[in-house]
């Protein structure tokens, strides 16, 4: 009796606190937004553009709270986790806006808290006070995401899959050296540091080659091999798949035992803490996908991208049958799968881009057996680097995009200097989505050497300034739609 009384008083007190907190404008519910994406998908640019557009009242007609003028103020606040570095928002914006350069690849984790003060749409809530919502966002190197699926895989699984994937047509030439080095190795031989190091280095070199633009492959774990962060040179990274394990148990003191121990240590000390601290507490998630880079590289890259997205989604799948469920403290209820960099296409092609990503997401969702969250798809650009126009060619009028291609980008033998604005006809995305994923198609294409779909990269846009020198809002494509889906209901 006594204890339930305490509980009751406690609860009443908490309720009272909450109410008075809200009345004093102090109560700010928080929402953790996961910005998920493989490396170079556009996470850092997305976060920077999102914050800038909210803080500076950008043009966001599809974001209802902003459109109806209910957002009083949005600002960066001190973040909740002291141990995590702050997201260098000001530096990123300065680079994008003043220097017109894109941010470097992210090498370590960082975090920010964006607080939005708004007026509730409902009269009842308005009576108490203005509303306040804090959105917490974490930025990290995309490569690290590839580690999540490893949590569910034994060293033997990791080794077997490593060798299976290495002989796929898109990888077989790149993995040749590593396979030649690994195949003669006897897993049962005595553990030897030099052998372990040679294998690990060769394996990492193969993964790096897969990631380069021409192949643009995505499924490349372990992630720290590509982006070691503070683990550079650490023994935790000195392991690699071994051949011919055939379910054999490792003899103590053998190379296999050593590799297995390090693989397990990598999972326990590197992957799990990252996952537990930053991924399991998410409420909402946006998955950014750079489909254009994979399209550029051909169907092998598209199939690989689909595999990566499927494996990652399986990690977020709630409920039984997911080895990670116990780690989750919250449940993600909305996921937005976003095709990024849509500004590389004329808007007439956006529907097709969206269709490609929808097919990728649908299959990934089905294969990952993913249920329990609303999944939506959008083609967007967090920072629009181009504008649209038309060019007359003979009797035809072609829809073009106009922007400044990055220095060194090439089209039809012409190399750009990074200064000149150019109109480009990006071509049409194919109507038939299936062919894009058909790997046999890629072999044909590589043999015939007929050109794949080609895109060039652009510099960040030149922004207009007012007479007072104030930069106008950052241009984007459907960032507002993404925002509405991700946080709109929390500002109702
Ligand atoms: N045109 C255009 N390019 C973009 C956009 N967003 C990203 N990019 C390009 O994509 C590159 C990668 O963007 P980032 O935001 O750094 O990608 P990331 O996901 O943070 O990558 P990692 O930090 O390596 O994981 C940039 O350098 C730009 O070239 C966009 O909205 N429009
Ligand atoms: Mg980044």
Image: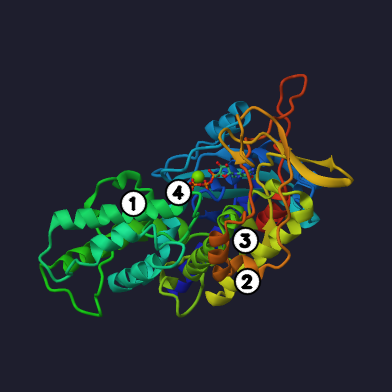
| Residue marked by disc 1 | 205
Instruction: Assess disc 2: are there few (<14), some (14-19) or many (≥20) residues with their C-alpha within 10 Å of its C-alpha.
Output: some
On-image quarter of the C terminus: bottom right
| Residue marked by disc 3 | 337
Q: Secondary structure at mark 3?
A: strand
Kindly tell me whether residue 322 is visible in this rendering: yes
Asked if the beta carbon under badge 2 is closer than 8 A to the nearest atom of ligand 1, the reply is: no
Q: Earlier in the sequence, mark 2 or mark 1?
A: 1
At 50% from the left and 40% from the top, the residue drawn is 87
Residue 466: percent from left, percent from top: 77, 23
At 79% from the left and 56% from the top, the residue drawn is 122
Numbered label attached to residue 362: 2
Residue 294: percent from left, percent from top: 56, 56
Q: Earlier in the sequence, mark 2 or mark 4?
A: 4
State the separation of the CA atoms marked 2 and 1.
33 Å
Asked if the beta carbon under badge 4 is closer than 8 A to the nearest atom of ligand 1, the reply is: yes
Q: Earlier in the sequence, mark 3 or mark 2?
A: 3
Q: Nearer the viewer, mark 3 or mark 1?
A: 1
Asked if the beta carbon under badge 1 is closer than 8 A to the nearest atom of ligand 1, the reply is: no
Numbered label attached to residue 157: none
Judge from the rendering whether residue 428 lies leftward or rightward of residue 260; answer left or right: right
Residue 134: percent from left, percent from top: 59, 48
Numbered label attached to residue 141: 4
Relative to 207, residue 325 above or below: below
State the separation of the CA atoms marked 3 and 1.
31 Å
State the separation of the CA atoms marked 2 and 4.
25 Å
């Amino acid at each position: 009796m006594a204890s339930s009384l305490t509980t009751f008083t406690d609860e009443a007190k908490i309720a009272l606190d909450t109410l008075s907190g809200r009345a004093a404008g102090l109560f700010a519910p928080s929402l953790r937004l996961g910005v998920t994406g493989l490396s170079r998908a556009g996470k850092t640019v997305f976060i920077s553009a999102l914050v800038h557009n909210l803080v500076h009242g950008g043009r966001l007609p599809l974001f209802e709270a902003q459109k109806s003028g209910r957002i009083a103020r949005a600002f960066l606040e001190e973040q909740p986790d002291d141990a995590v570095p702050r997201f260098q928002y000001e530096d990123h914006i300065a680079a994008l806006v003043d220097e017109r350069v894109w941010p470097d690849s992210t090498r370590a984790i960082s975090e920010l808290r964006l607080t939005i003060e708004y007026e509730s749409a409902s009269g009842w809530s308005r009576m108490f006070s203005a509303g306040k919502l804090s959105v917490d966002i974490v930025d990290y190197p995309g490569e690290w995401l590839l580690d999540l699926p490893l949590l569910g895989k034994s060293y033997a699984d990791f080794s077997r899959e490593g060798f299976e994937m290495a002989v796929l047509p898109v990888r077989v030439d790149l993995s040749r050296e590593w396979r030649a080095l690994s195949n003669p190795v006897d897993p049962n031989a005595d553990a030897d540091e030099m052998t372990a190091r040679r294998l690990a280095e060769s394996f990492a070199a193969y993964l790096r080659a897969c990631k380069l633009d021409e192949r643009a492959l995505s499924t490349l774990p372990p992630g720290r091999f590509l982006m070691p962060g503070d683990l550079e040179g650490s023994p935790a990274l000195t392991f690699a798949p071994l051949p011919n394990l055939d379910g054999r148990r490792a003899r103590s003191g053998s190379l296999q035992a050593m590799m297995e121990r390090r693989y397990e240590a990598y999972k326990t000390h590197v992957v799990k803490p990252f996952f537990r601290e930053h991924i399991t507490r998410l409420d909402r998630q946006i998955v950014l996908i750079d489909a254009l880079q994979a399209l550029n590289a051909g169907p092998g890259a598209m199939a690989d991208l689909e595999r990566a997205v499927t494996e990652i989604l399986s990690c977020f799948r709630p409920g039984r049958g997911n080895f990670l469920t116990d780690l989750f403290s919250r449940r993600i209820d909305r996921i937005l799968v976003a095709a990024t960099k849509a500004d590389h296409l004329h808007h007439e092609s956006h529907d097709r881009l969206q269709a490609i990503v929808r097919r990728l997401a649908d299959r990934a969702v089905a294969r990952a057996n993913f249920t329990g969250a609303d999944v939506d798809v959008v083609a967007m650009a967090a920072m629009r680097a181009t504008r649209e126009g038309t060019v007359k060619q003979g009797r035809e009028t072609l829809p073009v995009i106009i922007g400044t291609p990055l220095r060194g980008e090439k089209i039809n033998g012409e190399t750009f200097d990074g200064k000149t604005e150019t109109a480009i006809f990006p071509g049409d995305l194919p109507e038939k989505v299936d062919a894009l994923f058909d790997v046999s198609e890629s072999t044909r294409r590589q043999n015939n050497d007929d050109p794949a779909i080609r895109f060039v990269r652009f510099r960040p846009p030149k922004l207009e300034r007012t007479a007072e020198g104030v930069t106008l809002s950052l241009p984007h494509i459907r960032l507002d739609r993404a925002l509405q889906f991700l946080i709109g209901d929390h500002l109702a």
